[in-house]
Amino acid sequence: MQENIPSKQLHYRKGGPSLNKPGRLLSRALNKVLQNPYVLIAPAVILASLFSVYPILFAVKVSFMNWDVVTGEQSFAGLDNYRSIFADPDAIQVLKNTLIYAFFTVCFGLVFAVAIGILLQKSTFLTNLVQSVIFTPHIVSFVSVTIMWMWLLDPQMGIVNYLLKMLGFEPQLWMMGPKTSLLSIVIVSIWKGIGFSAMLVIAGLQGIPKYIYEAAKLDRSGRWSTLFRITIPLLSPTLFFMLITSTIGAFSSFDVVNLMTGGGPQGSSNLIVHWIYQIGFLKFQLGKAMAASVLFLILIGFISLMNFMFFSKKVHY
């Protein structure tokens, strides 16, 4: 039957069209190229180089320069930008604020997330409703959350001061006071992130086999013993992931400071990233801002490395 088929239609066969000789050669060459692992990871490497490696190298370069963003004049400054940072009293203040902010947001965020996750791990109508409610702040923009909390913490009309008066406590200035401004942004940051963290904990709890708890009951293990000897160790991979990501997120916080306090009053709530923004875009000291960014990158890398060194050994996979 094949002899009766016209020569121009020989490449059409039963089961679909087939490729002619040049097409087959091209297909083989393409398959050979796609089997190379370096070709498969090339898009990721190119994007990472374009959006991560190049900005870092550019920041390192500019950190050794005096760059006037208005006139465009550039000159080599050596280590002057780094010396000016270590001699700046504001740098010590923002570093202290950032460490305090990161410590409280990470520690209290993890503790509250574990407590809420354990309370809401059972799937009932009420727990599912509460999970949806506490997760809502995570999908709401920081602008909306900040405006709402600025009303709640208003020294004159805020409901928080109203409740404090009812309970017999002194009203506070909150984000307008140098002693309470940092506490205000800590409260808002924990409140916004607690829903997402609790969802991660619930997902981790659902991955723990039930027979382990049944065996613990047979051994007459108490609630606290079960919590610290079974739940927390088996939840440690999730907690370790939350620790790393929440630490980096806390050190990188910008919008809550910029929207609520602007770093004030008197720099009492200023954090590193917002301080770098002020140096670069408000004071136009681009070289100093880049030098601070490089030091900040080193600080984040060092803290992440310490977390891996001290806590990765306690994770039970």
Image (tube, rainbow, N blue to C red):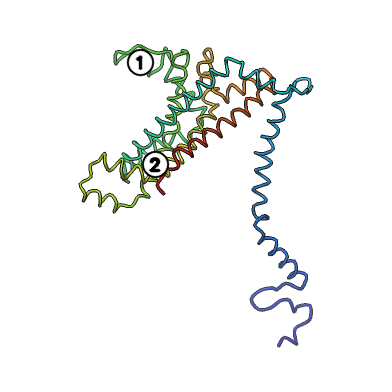
Q: Residues within 10 Å of mark 2 (few under 14, many from 20)?
A: many
Residue carrying label 2: 201
State the image coordinates of residue 195 (x, y, percent, origin top left).
41, 36
Badge 1 element: helix
Q: Nearer the viewer, residue 37 or 266?
A: 37
Instruction: Examine the rendering and report whether any part of residue 257 can be seen.
Output: yes
Q: Earlier in the sequence, mark 2 or mark 1?
A: 1
Q: Amino acid at mark 1?
A: Tyr
Q: Residue at x 73, y 23 (%)?
A: 78
- Name the mark nearer the viewer: 2 or 1: 2
Badge 2 element: helix
Residue 275 located left or right of residue 118: right
Q: Nearer the viewer, residue 156 or 27?
A: 27
Residue 184 located left or right of residue 298: left
Q: Residue at x 51, y 25 (%)?
A: 256
Instruction: Examine the rendering and report whether any part of residue 69 can be seen.
Output: no
Q: Amino acid at mark 2?
A: Val
Q: Nearer the viewer, residue 246 or 142?
A: 246
Q: Residue at x 29, y 51 (%)?
A: 212
Residue 178 located left or right of residue 165: right
Q: Quadrant of the N terminus?
A: bottom right
Q: Residue at x 47, y 25 (%)?
A: 101
Residue 162 is tagged as 1
Q: Residues within 10 Å of mark 1 (few under 14, many from 20)?
A: some
State the image coordinates of residue 99 (x, y, percent, origin top left).
49, 25
State the image coordinates of residue 75 (x, y, percent, origin top left).
78, 22
Residue 34 is tagged as none
